[in-house]
Image (cartoon, rainbow, N blue to C red):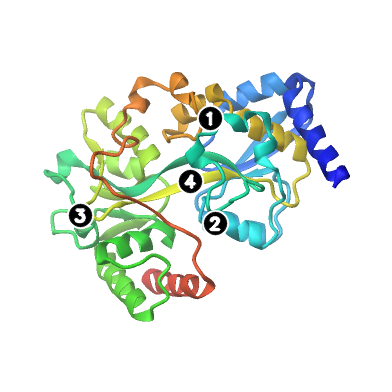
Amino acid sequence: MKIALAATATSVFALAAGLAQAEGQLHIYNWTDYTSPEVIEKFEAETGIDVSLDTYDSNETLLAKMQAGATGYDIIVPSHNFIPIYIAEGLVQEVDASAMPNFANVEDRWKFPAWDPEQKYSVPFHWGTASVAYRRDLYGKDLESYGEFFEPDEAVSGRISVFKTPEEIVNHAHLYLGQEFCNEDPAAMQRVQDLLIAQKPHVMAYSSEGMNDRLLNGDAIISNHWNGYAVKGRRLAEEAGKVLVYAYPKEGVIGWADGLMIPKSAENVENAKIFMNFMMDPENMGMQSNFAGYGGPIKGQDAFMTEDLRTAPEIVLPEGAKMVFSFACSAEAQSLIDRVWTNVLR
């Protein structure tokens, strides 16, 4: 026990000490368009650590790569419902986030979450929602229900864009059908499959990238979307005299939270911990939110965020809007999800 305590104390001291004394490399594996270049430049300047970045487009891609034994990464950024999988399968190492100096800056609601109750393995990063966005100027009305996405009218048929992976789309279907997430009932999952297969003739693309491009050029009128990415889309639309709206269907939106974790195979562990502590600083997380367009978990970061983002309709849920968090599914439920999605894309 004394050895463990000494190691923790040494790590905390290293984080609290002058960051410019650090050196070496840090290899980050993060979502596409999710890492602020300005934040990385600031981190490199303050620490002397050289950062490299690789990107992925889905939780499934990241998990498969880690399960296959991928090496060379020091930081990964899975979503909250995948974090228990990494812990259970021994794919990540303990970081003891609560012992880091800047952990005091984390808002209480994001401390010790259900997916990492002792905050041993992850540091909170961004949070947000998944729903659909649409071109209001092309659609001609407000989108009020997922029914308009899953069972679209002829005016938008062939101009629907859907996420490439089932994580959010299956839960959106559950919301529309009034069913529980991570459903182990084959009959319930059959209803999801029937809905998604019936939607398929109306779909122009299954992709988790380029949603803003398809909406802005008019190829898509309605698209699955994440709220922060929709902030960027709305800004671009306004510049072009178009109207892109992030929808809050009456059935609810999917809530999510991402966390920073250190893979078991990481080579630059102390540098990764320095980065984790760095990101729990209000100024740094504020800058990161400005780039990514998502809310953050750090007290005081609002002072470093743009007014547009602080008040963005994509970030600030309207009164009465429902946000439902997903969670890690059982093996049985996940098997049904995978089977449904395979049949949909067949």
The tag earlier along the polypeptide, 2 or 1, is 1
* Residue 258 seen by the camera: yes
Give the quarter of the image for residue 10: top right
Residue at 63 percent of width and 29 percent of height? 102
The tag earlier along the polypeptide, 4 or 1, is 1
> Tag 3, which secondary structure?
loop
Kindly report the distance in space between the C-alpha atoms of the residues bearing marks 4 and 2. Answer: 10 Å
Mark 3 or mark 1, whichever is nearer to me:
3
Circle 1 sits on which residue?
A: 36
Residue 59, x across and y down, in percent: 52, 54
The tag earlier along the polypeptide, 3 or 4, is 3
Determine which of the numbered discs, if any, sits on residue 257 in the image.
Answer: 4
| In the image, residue 206 above or below residue 195 | above
The tag earlier along the polypeptide, 3 or 1, is 1
Amino acid bearing label 2? Phe
Determine which of the numbered discs, if any, sits on residue 89 in the image.
Answer: none
Kindly report the distance in space between the C-alpha atoms of the residues bearing marks 2 and 1. Answer: 23 Å
Mark 3 or mark 4, whichever is nearer to me:
4
| In the image, residue 333 above or below residue 237 | below
Circle 3 sits on which residue?
A: 145
Mark 2 or mark 1, whichever is nearer to me:
2
Kindly report the distance in space between the C-alpha atoms of the residues bearing marks 2 and 3. Answer: 28 Å
Q: From the image, which quarter does the C terminus lie in?
A: bottom left
Circle 2 sits on which residue?
A: 82
Residue 86, x across and y down, in percent: 63, 57
Amino acid bearing label 3? Ser
Kindly report the distance in space between the C-alpha atoms of the residues bearing marks 3 and 1. Answer: 33 Å
Amino acid bearing label 4? Ala
In the rendered structure, are the residues bearing label 4 and label 1 in contact, judged by CB atoms less than 8 Å apart? no
Give the quarter of the image for residue 344: bottom left
